[in-house]
Image (cartoon, helix red, strand yellow):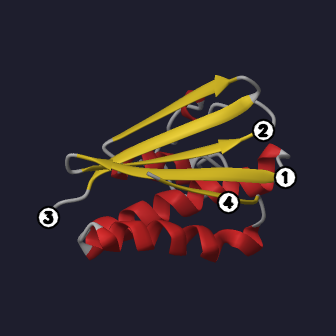
Amino acid sequence: MKELTIEASIAKLDEVIDFIDAFLEDHECPMKIMTQINVAAEEIFVNIAHYSGSEKATITISKSDDMAEITFTDSGRPYNPLEKPDPDITLSAEERDIGGLGVFIVKKTMDSVSYEYIDGHNVFTMRKGITA
């Protein structure tokens, strides 16, 4: 398991992605899967930076069998993004409510996602198989 605690700022996004990529590359993750994980990680980290009010975020990544697990922890306002209904993607962009599409993409591209509020911290975990 590897861990990174970093300022919850958009300016730190590249460092977060580099941290995740280094781990995935060490475990020979295929590029397509790495890209899906990066898109999901970007969405979650950007949401933390923009909306949580937390000064820092901690990202942990580990591998068990052929599954990567990435957890984002912050001390911002409690918010479970999984409670929001999925957007109706059958509607045109103009007809849809603003927001929610990024988390929807995370839910669709990861094998599993979960959220907990533990001891004053938001804990968002996503899992993805990392073999071809």
User: What separation in Å lies between label 2 and label 4 (alpha carbons)?
Assistant: 15 Å
Residue 6, quarter of picture: bottom right
Q: Position of residue 11 (x, y in %)?
A: 76, 74
| Rendered image: mark on residue 132 | 3
The amino acid marked with disc number 3 is Ala
Of 49 and 100, nearer the camera is 49
User: What separation in Å lies between label 3 and label 1 (alpha carbons)?
Assistant: 37 Å
Q: Are marks 1 and 4 in contact (CB under 8 Å)?
A: no
Pointer 1 residue: 55
Pointer 4 residue: 46
Local crowd at mark 3 within 10 Å, few (<14), some, or many (≥20)? few
As drawn, the residue found furthest toward the left would be 132
* Of pointers 1 and 4, the one earlier in the residue sequence: 4
Local crowd at mark 1 within 10 Å, few (<14), some, or many (≥20)? some
Pointer 2 residue: 75
Horizontally, residue 118 falls left or right of residue 29, namely: right
* Of pointers 1 and 2, the one earlier in the residue sequence: 1
* Of pointers 3 and 1, the one earlier in the residue sequence: 1
Of 41 and 70, nearer the camera is 70
Which residue shows up at 82% across the image and 47% down it? 54
Q: Position of residue 112 (x, y in %)?
A: 36, 38
Q: Are marks 3 and 1 in contact (CB under 8 Å)?
A: no
Q: Are marks 1 and 2 in contact (CB under 8 Å)?
A: yes
* Of pointers 3 and 4, the one earlier in the residue sequence: 4
Q: Are marks 2 and 3 in contact (CB under 8 Å)?
A: no
